[in-house]
Amino acid sequence: MPQARTAARTRWTNWAGNQSAHPARAVTPGTAEELAKEILRAADGGRTVKAVGSGHSFTSIASAGDGVLVRPHAMTAVRGVDRENGTVTVEAGLPLHRLNRVLAAAGLSLTNMGDIEVQTAAGATSTGTHGTGRDSASLAAQLRGLEIVLADGSIRQCSPTENARLFEGARLGLGALGVITALTFAVEPAFLLTAHEQPMGFDEVLERLDDLTAVNEHFEFYWFPHTSRCSTKRNNRSQGPAAPLPRFKEWLEDDFLSNTVWEGACRVGRRFPAAVPAIAAVASRAWSDRSYTDTAYRVFTSPRTVRFTEMEYAVPREAVGDVLRELRAMVERSDWRISFPVEVRFAPADDLWLSTAHGRDTAYIAVHLYRGTAEQGYFTAVEQLMTAHRGRPHWGKLHTRDAEYLAGAYPRFADFTALRDEVDPDRRFGNDHLRRVLGA
């Protein structure tokens, strides 16, 4: 059997560039068995093990510190498509953009997605990546099974009927229970979505919010700080025919304007903060009314090349109007200069132990800062606002919550930590971040 490729001490950084580590070594196993050997080798040397994906978490959740970094690039196979049962099984390192194209070629689709597709399958599910949906939940909620390597080197197959308790914890497990090597997703026949994007005033969005979220399968909106304007997006299933954006228009609006021009505007705002309100006024008017119909994943996701840091909190759905009005008032009375719009999405209640939507219909409020921009107290104040409304932080995005707070926010938190004590008593998969959010 070929051995996992090993590299000496290297430097790891995440996509945003705000997290880095210098692990003792990096390995790239090609099979679960190779991975198991690396975990046992690390244990013999007293080192921790952390798997990384594409680095799209803004926290240090995947940091290996001075331990062993597991890279996913050699575990990207599609193990099987089961049309009869409506599932696809893929290896953990397969990027979502490749999964989407494999499914499309087979006439299949995921039910819901976030707004980018560069994450690995395991990285996205393990941190609770989600989109927006009236009836459909996060990627982890779409899992029907998984394969995981534990600290003792054992390889476990998990599902609702096999190692069910481990499945409940590991499908959104923060990398704290073991290293996932394969995942089985529920899929359905491919479908089209019609997107309708429309500018709308801040007050109008909140006044109509109950109707907009009830009538549309997938509704989200962006509010531009320093303005009273929002851009709304409604995605609904369509019988067709497909009517995608013309290639040039798609490039112009979704790539050139949303990335290249926006990057330049953000640089100006970072260099000259006083210009940010004027930039926001122009940007909010640049989002025009448009509709198109395309393959689901092409509507769910968009290219994102402008780098930033992000905080996102999940609040009870019924609180979102009050939270947003308070956030707007905070911005108006502060000296902050916020160039990025505030993103608002929705999800139904689910039963995943560590899901930010566990047990309650949820609204997600995400705030961003362009890379290199001074924090100005913005994230700190936003976090205080969110926690005052029983907010739960996104596991892959910036926050300062600890295990004491999170234990009170998640009814099944103790179940998860008890499971962790059983399968990883020596904290082989621990790091500083997990010690903070899960406890020692």
Image (tube, helix red, strand yellow):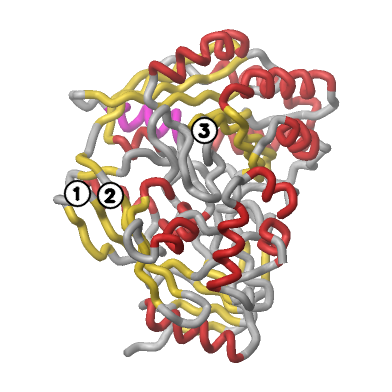
Image position of 408 (left or right of 106): right
Q: Looking at the picture, which amino acid does disc 2 mark? A: Arg
Q: Are marks 2 and 1 in contact (CB under 8 Å)?
A: yes
In terms of sequence position, does the residue under pointer 2 or pointer 3 come before the other? 2
The answer to whether residue 49 is seen in the rendering is yes
Q: Which mark is residue 258?
A: 3
Which residue is rendered at x = 68% and y = 16% of the image?
227
Which of the two residues, 303 or 191, is positioned nearer the viewer here?
191
Residue displayed at 57% across by 33% down? 364
In the picture, the disc for residue 105 is 1
Q: Quadrant of the N terminus?
A: bottom left
Residue type at mark 1?
Ala
Q: Position of residue 334 (x, y in %)?
A: 84, 24
Callout count: 3
**What residue is disc 2 on?**
101
Residue at image location 56% in from the left, 30% down from the top: 363
Q: Is residue 93 above or below residue 35?
A: above
| Mark 2 neighbour class, 10 Å CA radius: few under 14, some 14 to 19, many 20 or more | some
Q: Is residue 17 above or below residue 34?
A: above
Q: Which residues are magenta?
A: 244-257
Q: Residue sitting at 59 percent across and 19 percent down?
A: 284
Question: Where in the figure is residue 286, as x and y percent of width and height?
Answer: 54, 19
